Amino acid sequence: MRFSRLLPLAVIGVVLTACVHQGVQAPANGGHDLITAAELEAAGANTLYDAVVKLRPNFLKPRTTTAYGRPATSPLMLYVDGERMESIDDLRHLLPPGVQEVRFYEPQIANLRFARYNNAAGAIAVVMKQSTGTDQ
């Protein structure tokens, strides 16, 4: 009877030891809501818009809830280094090598993060790489 209680613990110990021995690796990409600089580099896209289309096309789909089949009226918002841009089309003017990360925020989180604006369709936030030059 005592042996039957110890057996599951022994199995768990062996499994955990095997996991630690093999090591745990981070995901190859940034996850469903993040595009990393490494992914952007590997994508080989000419513009940031093209890279987003290739890597996470779902970022460009507004999350606005529609009633009675009406089209969404709230635009998807774009922020670059915290500043609101005119439209998602501004992604076409950004080059992937200059971007640190691209993150998608669901509407509820976007409204908390960027409270000054209506983010009912969600938001894409771009963080640019910082200049390493000495001019300031």
Image (cartoon, helix red, strand yellow):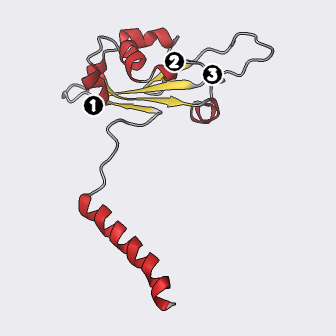
Q: Which residue is mark 3?
A: 121
Residue drawn at 38 percent across, 36 percent down: 30
Residue at horizontal 45 percent and vertical 76 percent from the top = 8
- Residue 121: which quarter of the image? top right
Instruction: Name the residue type under label 2.
Output: Leu
Q: In which quadrant of the rendered view does residue 122 lie?
A: top right
The residue at 63%/29% (across/down) is: 107
The secondary structure type at the circle numbered 3 is loop
Amino acid type indicated by mark 3 = Ala
Side (left or right) of 64 relative to 46: right
Q: Which residue is mark 2?
A: 60
Circle nearer the N terminus (1, 3): 1
Q: Is residue 100 visible?
A: yes
Residue position marked by numbered label 1 in the rendering: 38
Q: In which quadrant is the C terminus drawn?
A: top left
Residue that sits furthest to the left in the current view: 134
Q: Are marks 2 and 1 in contact (CB under 8 Å)?
A: no
Gap in Å between the C-alphas at discs 3 and 2? 10 Å
**Precedes in sequence: disc 3 or disc 2:** 2
Q: Marks 2/1: CA distance?
A: 20 Å
